[in-house]
Image (tube, helix red, strand yellow):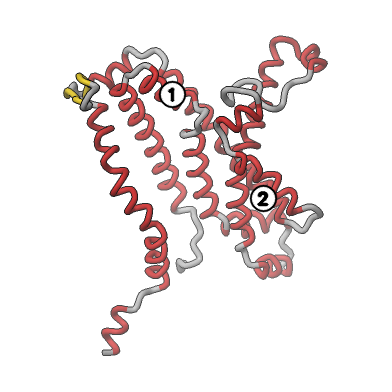
């Protein structure tokens, strides 16, 4: 009997996995019931052509929609490459900025609660129509928030002014997109035991050494989470040019099949990028439950 009880006893890791599965089970059930059907239709549509709108009758055309996108569509590939470039630039800047801000507002300073709220306000306000009305723009690409003053424009001239304005636009986007990352980094920082820092100080470690030897390894799981979250957030942003283009092709131009193909190309690329990031960083993530 004792052997059987020991056999069915769950380890700490198994209990955590079971708890995680319980938390995500409502989403899994919802995905199976409401999501798998539309996904199957979307995949089938990307390889087909609609011959009759009524009844959504489709005719199989193979890879014709994908060939059209890469060989004949003059807008998709340039937009796609531009979105990739913007994401490559914005993601590391967002992560570094969020971590620095989280470290600063995690310290015991006057007005700490105010700064935490201020950086999270953009998340509460949201994006889309609210963002457009607040900033007076259609998208996040030109003239966002911080504008180069006229006196500075006269000094910089027509060559350097667009460069500086582009930099300010990107900084504004980073400020608006960093709220969730800051909160997650704060949670990770507050989960680090203070005894680790006290022991390091007793051994004569500097702030810089404690950051690299304690803080960074201990929040490495949060860094991985924020890395993937930020990539997905920038790739799927409602003001993303390629997302707008896919929606326009699908619903404004009624090119549903080509829009579905574009969507699956975009999804496949985003999924591969996230899996590569996870595969590269997984071995560098510190796990307290693992024994060295």
Could you tell which of marks 2 and 1 lies nearer the N-terminus? 1
Q: Residue furthest left?
A: 60
Looking at the image, which residue is at 29% across and 16% down?
68
Q: Residue at x 28, y 23 (%)?
A: 257
Residue 63 visible here: no
Q: Is residue 104 above or below residue 96?
A: below
Q: Which residue is mark 2?
A: 102
Residue 61's quadrant in the figure?
A: top left
Name the spot of residue 132 as percent of width and height, x first.
Answer: 60, 27
Between 201 and 138, which is closer to the camera in this rendering? 138
Q: Residue 3, located in which quarter of the rendered image? A: bottom left
For disc 1, the marked residue is 80
For numbered disc 1, what is the local secondary structure? helix
Residue at 54 percent of width and 50 percent of height: 223
Image height of 170 relative to 52, above or below: below
At label 1, counting other C-alpha atoms closer than 10 Å, the crowd grade (few under 14, some 14-19, many 20 or more) is: some
């Amino acid at each position: 009997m004792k052997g059987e009880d020991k056999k069915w006893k769950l380890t700490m890791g198994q209990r955590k996995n079971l708890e995680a599965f319980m938390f995500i089970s409502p989403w899994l059930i919802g995905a199976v019931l409401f999501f798998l059907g539309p996904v199957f239709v979307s995949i089938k549509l990307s390889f087909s052509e609609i011959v009759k709108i009524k009844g959504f009758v489709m005719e199989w055309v193979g890879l014709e929609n994908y060939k059209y996108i890469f060989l004949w569509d003059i807008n998709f590939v340039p937009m796609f490459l531009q979105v990739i470039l913007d994401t490559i630039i914005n993601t590391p800047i967002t992560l570094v900025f969020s971590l620095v801000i989280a470290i600063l507002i995690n310290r015991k300073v006057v007005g700490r609660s105010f700064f935490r709220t201020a950086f999270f306000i953009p998340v509460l306000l949201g994006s889309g129509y609210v963002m457009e009305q607040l900033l007076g723009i259609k998208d996040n690409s030109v003239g966002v928030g911080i504008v180069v003053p006229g006196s500075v424009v006269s000094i910089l001239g027509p060559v350097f002014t667009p460069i500086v304005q582009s930099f300010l636009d990107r900084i504004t986007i980073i400020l608006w997109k960093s709220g969730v990352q800051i909160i997650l980094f704060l949670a990770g920082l507050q989960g680090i035991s203070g005894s680790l820092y006290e022991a390091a100080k007793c051994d004569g470690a500097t702030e810089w050494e404690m950051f690299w030897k304690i803080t960074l390894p201990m929040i490495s799981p949060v860094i991985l989470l924020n890395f993937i979250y930020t990539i997905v957030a920038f790739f799927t942003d409602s003001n993303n040019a390629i997302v707008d283009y896919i929606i326009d092709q699908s619903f404004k131009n009624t090119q549903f099949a080509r829009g579905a193909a574009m969507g699956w190309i975009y999804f496949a690329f985003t999924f591969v990028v996230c899996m590569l990031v996870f595969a590269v960083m997984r071995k560098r993530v510190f796990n307290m439950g693992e024994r060295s």
